[in-house]
Image: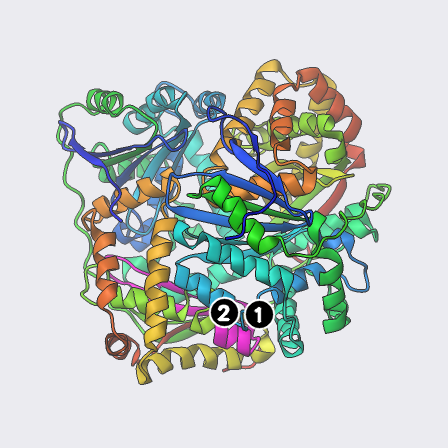
Amino acid sequence: MVLEHERHALSCGATVLTRPLESNDIVVVRALTPMGPIYETDGEAGLCSLTQAVLTRGTQQRSASEMQDALADLGSDIDASTGSDLGSVSMRATAATWERTLDLYIETLTAPAFDPREVETEIEQTLGALEAREDQLLARATDLFREVFYGDHPLHKRVLGYSHTVATFDRERVATCARTFYRPFPPIIVAVGRFDPEVLLARLETAFGTTPIVPPTPRPAPPEPRPGKQRLELDREAAYLMHGFPAPNWRDLDYPVARVLDAILGGSMSSRLFIELREKQALGYQVSSIYSDQLDGSFLAGYIVTDPGRADQAARGLAEQFRRVVEEPVEEEEILAARRYLRGSYLIGAETNSAQAMRLGRHEGYGLGQDFGARWLTAIEAVTPEAVQALARRWFDREPTCAYVVPRGAPDF
Amino acid sequence: MKGGSSKLEWIGGSGEPSPAPFARARLDNGVRVLIRPNSAVPVVAVDCWIEVGALHETDEHAGISHFLEHMFFKGTRRYPLGAMDRLVKQMGGYNNAATSMEYTHYYIVAPAEHAWNAADLLADHLADPALPADELERERVVVKEEIRRKDDSPQGRLYTALSEAVYGDSDYAREVLGTPESLDRIDTEVMRDWWRSNYAGDRIVVAIAGDVEADQALAEVEARFGGLAAGPPAPEPPEPPPVVPRQVDVRMEVAQGYLAWGFTVPGREDLDSLCALEVGATILGDGETSRLHRRLIDELRLVTEIGAWTYGLDRTGLLGVSGVCGPDRREAVESEIAGTLEAALRHGVSLEEVRRAQTILAADFAYDNETNAALTGTLGEFETLYGAAEAYRDVLRGIEAVTPDRVMEALVQWTVPDRAVRAWVGPDGA
């Protein structure tokens, strides 16, 4: 379950993980650096995301459109984005084009232009995307859940930010943000696919030079999750309900138990939530769980999209499934199925070169060790019904966090 | 395992890019089998395609193919209700299904050691679905909920509106999900008839990709799918309706406006034109180097999203332009779309643009065929819709052969702005 790879160190201190493969023609290189909403103040919400968007829009040698043309002529892509605490810049090319793409990729990382006009364009694009997100109701329910759950901790914010923050950004803010999080280069680079590691390492070494990469900004203190209920009324057809609790983090001893419990509650179409709420009660088409597992501030929530006339029944149904795991041990057979499901999903989840690069990069970026997956997959073999119930009691026997997006005038519940 | 009589025909050599090389066989009952060995990861995908979708239905029972897709998972005599999902979970895999205008498909992706259990589950559910009456009632509610969810999404509403605007009240406008009323008219007898008359030999393709050996895979598949009932190919699709330029506006509580233009273009039966239009759509609106992106986003900052695309059914197709913008910008955006199209019609496209579009399309095809599920998706879809999985090569070659003149000729013939059918979803008062 550990993806074989080689580890290299550049003179500047950056770590490079290489995994040459012959199984297909695709080459993915991914650079990672800690950044995102967890490091932003409320007034900076969305700044990291905007910085990543502008990073790929032109260099000191090439305008945004020249860069786009050069990539399109190779059939290659360079993308940058950020999650709540880790940013990524990746390139995708074929064996025939990867070296030429790598030159463009290195140029993007080492000499971004942050052209003021491109910053303005990206701000406009982000403002539009924020409005479009308002139109996606499950996303709104998730945003609302995070607002309640994280309270005033930086993790409460949306990655894209808010229109009132994004509208205040400019070239200077973006350039400062890039300097803060790229110090001056990303500390982790991962490459997977049909490429020559020696060529990659030589080019990176030359490009990054010997000036040491400065250690990252310290991570803020972990959040203190909050219970509570928020409701948002809109002129729409269906009700979107989320109901959840804090859950173990990656380094917690009971993390493997939480993976098993999540697989029992919401993994696949034979999960408890799916069987009880969709198959038995026909309460909705979309029903599952989200285990937002992280370094800290993890949560496990159930969600359903349902008929507003039956929203109270659906909300009770979600609550009931959490209560059930607190009150009764799960079946041995459910644990057995969950183990196999988790092992298989882990294997299937790394089918593409891009997914493998992401897994290697995340394990490195979060300091979890490359055997992190193998460790928790081994640990789930020892999980018992008693351990699952103990976990449920520890984490779910409290007031939940609930976010409801419902049609206007829907009855209270 | 009893040996079968079917023979594998190999397509493509080991040096040919993916999805080749793969093998095909035809079982005695007409079921076609596609096998694509791939030992990159110990994973397998088994994907069963049936050539039945909304286009084959009647308005009375609109949505029955998709409703049957939901009922497929409700057990057989050998596998009771819930067993499919439970067993797939125990394999460590996932299963799902999809229904479109022209096909329905069911797939399981699992660790390779479970390949034949996965095949067995799918074969038995195709051959002997229980279709229990009480489950039919419950699932009807679930499908209605799926309709409600789609109606809450501005994009869902937009494509329904575009389809209505382009296809009027013809078979081509039928909603894959059906309507609450048409779903109410479907009982177990109607459902069973639909299954019996459509889930048969010549309309079924089984595609397998992953860590399997081809001869063994054929024997395993034949043992399980060889017993399915034989049956004739799908009927010829209906005559597409004449197109009348029109506009459909939908009001809902949204922050942004969502617009789509559609032009009726030839379907897959005229592959040459469809390839030229695909290159044309790529130049107009696929990605950051496209004309619409450069003009409407980079220069004017008028839209949040803009794109052009093609969609090909057998006898008719669409070239679409779709975008998302502030509701007050609709007129400006539509005027710019028209202007961009008119410039292409008047001055054509350059050789450089055509070459770039060809590179983008070829690279996307390679990137899109990386996983086993993607490989069975491509092979199964081409075998079902084109009658030969290797037809993807014709599409790739067709795109490679397109010239600037051919793009201009196709755009002039099919995409005159005055003939656009338009759909809009926006807030009240916009």
Q: Name the residue type under label 2.
A: Ala
Decide if residue A147 is on the left or right side of residue A409.
left
Decide if residue A17 is on the left or right side of residue B164.
left
Residue situated in front as seen by the camera: B77 or A233? B77
A300 in magenta: yes
Q: Mark 1 points at which residue?
A: B75
Q: Give the image location of residue A67, x and y in percent.
A: 43, 23
Q: In this view, does A195 lie above or below A243?
A: above
Residue at coordinates 71% horizontally, 16% vertically from top-left?
A: B405
Q: Which mark is residue B271?
A: none
Q: Name the residue under label 2.
A: B83
Q: Are marks 2 and 1 in contact (CB under 8 Å)?
A: yes
Residue at coordinates 57% horizontally, 23% vertically from top-left?
A: B358
- How has the structure been colored for display? rainbow
Residue at coordinates 39% horizontally, 34% vertically from top-left?
A: A54
Q: Give the image location of residue B56, x and y in percent.
A: 77, 53
Residue situated in front as seen by the camera: B259 or B313? B313
Mark 1, residues whose alpha carbon is within 10 Å: few (<14), some, or many (≥20)?
many
Q: Identify the magenta region.
A: A275-303
Chain letter for mark 2? B
Residue situated in front as seen by the camera: A149 or A408? A149
Q: Is mark 1 on a helix, strand or loop?
A: loop
Decide if residue A354 is on the left or right side of residue B416.
left
Q: Name the residue type under label 1.
A: Gly
Instruction: Kindly report the distance in space between the C-alpha atoms of the residues bearing marks 2 and 1.
Output: 7 Å
Is there any visible trace of residue A182 in the rendered image?
yes
